[in-house]
Amino acid sequence: MPDSANASLDRIRHSLAHLLAAAVLKEFPDAKLAIGPTIENGFYYDFLLPRSLAPDDLAKFEKTMRSLAAQNLPFKGESVTPGEARALFKDQPFKLELVEEFAKAGNKLTVYRTGDAFMDLCRGGHVENTEEIPAEGFKLDKIAGAYWRGSEKNPMLQRIYGIAFESKKALDDFLALREEAEQRDHRKLGERLDLFTFSDLVGPGLPLWTPRGTLLRDILDKFVWELREKRGYVRVDIPHITKRGLYEKSGHWEKYKDDLFRIKTREGHEFAMKPMNCPHHAQIYARRPWSYRELPQRYASTTKVYRDEQSGELAGLTRVLAITQDDAHVFCRETQAKGEFIKIWDIVHEFYGAFGFALRVRLSLHDPAHPEKYLGDAARWKTAEDMLREIAREKKADAFEGVGEAAFYGPKLDFMAKDALGREHQVATIQLDMNMPERFDLACTNEKGGRERIVMIHAAIMGSIERFLAVIIEHYAGAFPTWLAPVQAAVLPVSDKSNEYGSSVCAALAAAGIRAELSEADESLGKRIREAKLMKIPYLLVVGEKEQKDGAVAVQSRKGDEGAAALEDFIKKIRKEAEIKAI
């Protein structure tokens, strides 16, 4: 959508938030108003109300909003002094808190009136008149709880969400896509396909992986490791806790101290569950002196890190407390960094190509207007960022710049992939770090015998395995390609008489490296076929007396009934499919 269209839609959504507040005040004159911003796909408004809302209330508010919009009410803004604002909002404590905050910061105060129906403290961005609002292009969506300003120390408010688009068709398209997304929800599919579970006794945000889910994780991790091993990486292993001092020296403690799980030993020492791996890998490099001839050093480790997320932020596999990273760090000379970046770039494209993802690249840069958010000086940042721009140009990448998206220690290449529903996800990332080597005094001896500062490259191909699995479960709707499926073939004997042959078929598949499962004839064949299809197993092999006589299997795939095939031929077919990672 062009920027002008986005801006127009944002004004419509912002105006609808005001109409929502007007509708709520009509029903609850003593309602206390909080904030009502636009968000992706719509808007919301927070209220303190005398009773809990019910879904029927939304229909009533929606009707009032449409009635107000039909009155062709103008939106008009005006500047006010802090004193005038206090008088206007004397019965609105949340607005008064904002007035005091804005006044103290010296910010300009403005109010916007919607005809005579409503007035709000607002910086603007509205339609000129409610006649510009598409009457059938919006709907109120849901009710949720939200603390004022996100703090549990503040009152709990009721948040009403709305969805808004430029037309009824656009709204209907969005709702249809959302319904499809709900069908693909990785939380539902993960349970149905027996991949992972959560336990109240273990705690939220801590997924437990079943045998099938663990197999899926291992297949992905093995794939990444094979790509890295070919390019000279070696495995290392690190502990899950560390002394506070490590993160103080790296700079992570000051930035992330509120997100850490902390441990006090009986001797009074303070440790933390590691939230990242890079300082540990830096200590492995720092264990001895290095010659320039020995560089690059490439360390890889798939391991968990831990972040103390708030419970309200946890969501399935996309936001968890225990995050598995396929992490790697390269320690090299600055002159070698570009070549190492390109090696990782090639790994990323080979890996994501196996899933059919086309990638675009965000050059995640620092925000020069806020240098206090980053480690290192401006010259170091310019050198690092220019290198990333050069790599993107050489690779002829579909690239765009994201100012302010850099890590606090260095710029990044963030790879973006669109899933089957057209949603874009950040997946792999490569980060150039010139600051941690400085903090840990990491160096090598150069050709002249002098001490030369090195650079450090951070690279995660999947990033978080949990989050990546959420993406691909939804991308494939749980129907993984054969090479990735935890169970590649289900063997279904027609009757008890064929159980023995079914068992021998299953053994032959396993001996050929094919992940097979025997579903013996305890239930009807039809029921077992339905269950295998619900588990989204790529191939169902039905075997009876005829197949046993012919040394064959009757093959059903996702494409339908493929007829009989010699067992040996089927094994060749499925092995080839898995070998080339056919999508």
Image: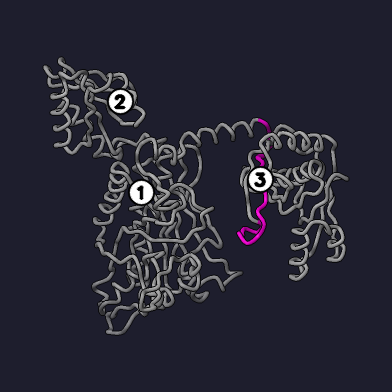
Q: Which residues are magenta?
A: 148-168
**160 within the magenta span:** yes
Q: Residue at x 61, y 60 (%)?
A: 151
Residue nearest the observer in this picture, 87 or 255: 87
Quarter holding the C terminus is top left
372 is higher (above) or lower (below) than 67? below
Q: Is residue 396 visible to us here? A: no
Q: Residue at x 49, y 71 (%)?
A: 381
- Residue 578 is situated, as x and y percent measured from the top left of the image, at 25, 37
Q: Residues within 10 Å of mark 1 (few under 14, many from 20)?
A: some
Check residue 557 in the rendering and tell me which mark sits there, or answer none.
2
- Residue 7 is situated, as x and y percent measured from the top left of the image, at 69, 47
Q: Pointer 3: what residue?
A: 6
132 is higher (above) or lower (below) than 457? above
- Residue 364 is situated, as x and y percent measured from the top left of the image, at 50, 60
**490 within the magenta span:** no
